[in-house]
Image (tube, helix red, strand yellow):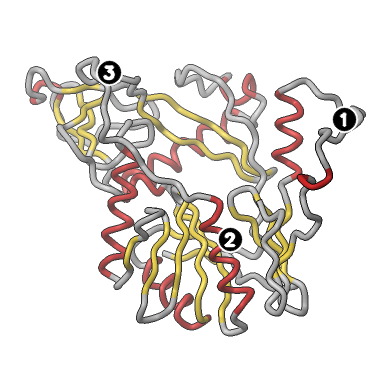
Amino acid sequence: MIVEISEGTREHLPVPEEDGEVLPDVGGANLGLGSPEELLQARRSELSKMEGLEVYTPVLESSVPQGSYWTTLRWVDVRKSTNELKSRLVAREFKGAAGGEERDDVFAATPVPASLRMLLLKVANDPRYVLRTADVTSAFLHAGLQGPPVYTRPPEEWKAPAGFKGPVVWKIERSLYGLRNSPRSWQDHLCSLLSSFGFRRGRSDGSVFFCGETGVTLVVHVDDLAVAGPADEVGDLLERLGKQLLLKVYPELSPENPLTFLGRKLTQDGDGTIRVLPSLTLFKRLAELVGLQPNTNGKMTPMPKKYEPAQATSLHRQDIQLTALQ
């Protein structure tokens, strides 16, 4: 399913620390996120989504084999905007929990900065190319669970279906957020899907995918996608992905429509120049973390002139400049 988004900006607030206990009568008010009713509605909406994606299978606790692996759950609640409160149910699989051993099978790649530069160069240097971004809703839940079966007790907001005689638990079927191998499972799932569409995975950067037949290139950062290529081919790819994933698609980059990707704001001038602007929100958060006040005076780091950064921060079709593009 594809959901078209008119604007590519979203407000992210810090995730509140809470212990995951179901306290609908006081939870929302104490967390300062909204009313208890709004919080409960957000959690039930997440449970409905999980049911639709077949994240779990209800089973009798008495039927679980002895020695099976169990994990616990907690709620993470985030207000993403004034009118949107989102809840996510995550597993609490601690480091080394499975047998107390370190694991090397949970690595998932993320793109290097040069990959985004390469993508922007393709768009800036070819007037036929467009740039679009998209993100996958509940990405991990699309991937099947890898490894041995995992069981957990459901949250109190969930009601067991009729017909069970005895305590009911969940057998996890999908890569639930919080399980250590979920990022790797999602990445393998997306790679398999793109491969079926004719894409090849990059050797130097496993987060880059290219289709030689269509000329479309993707840069993937977990659930965020940046897609560049001919407009028709990009649209066709996003439509095909939307039939397999819960996908939010943003309009293509243009002078009227800036995009945000990996914390960077991308704008395009009328002559095709693409500009990369840093995220002021990230700078403000960093300043808060180190205790800097809004009226703090900024100072330049002393350095020889020959090492001072260049001023150019744009990509142009006729005069492509890479310096200071971070």
Badge 2: residue crowd in 10 Å (few <14, some 14–19, many ≥20): some
Find the distance from the CA under tag 3 to the CA under tag 1: 42 Å
**Residues under numbered marks 3 and 2 in contact, where contact means CB atoms less than 8 Å apart:** no
Q: Earlier in the sequence, mark 2 or mark 1?
A: 2
Q: CA distance from mark 2 to mark 1?
A: 32 Å
Which residue bears the numbered disc 1?
A: 294
Query: Which amino acid lies under the numbered mark 2 shown in the image of this protein?
Result: Arg
Q: Which residue is mark 3?
A: 97
Give the residue type at disc 1. Answer: Pro
Question: Which element is circle 1 on?
Answer: loop
Give the residue type that dot 3 points to.
Ala
Mark 2 touching mark 1, by CB under 8 A?
no
Q: Quarter of the image holding residue 125?
A: bottom right
Q: Quadrant of residue 83?
A: top right
Q: Is residue 256 visible?
A: no
Contact check, label 3 and label 1, Cβ < 8 Å: no
Badge nearest the viewer, 2 or 1? 2
Residue at mark 3 to residue at mark 2: CA–CA distance: 39 Å
Q: Which residue does the image show at 81% across and 33% down from the upper left?
A: 301
How far across and how far down the image is residue 53, in percent? Answer: 31, 49
Q: Give the quadrant of residue 213.
A: bottom left
Mark found first going from the N terminus, 3 or 2: 3
Residue 180 point in image, percent of width and height: 32, 31
How crowded pointer 3 is (Cα within 10 Å; few <14, some 14-19, many 20+) is rated as: some
Q: Mark 3 falls on what kind of element?
A: loop
In percent of width and height, residue 143 lies at: 29, 48
Q: Of tags 3 and 2, which is closer to the observer?
A: 2
Q: Relative to residue 184, is residue 280 drawn left or right?
A: right
Residue in the picture at 62% in, 23% down: 31
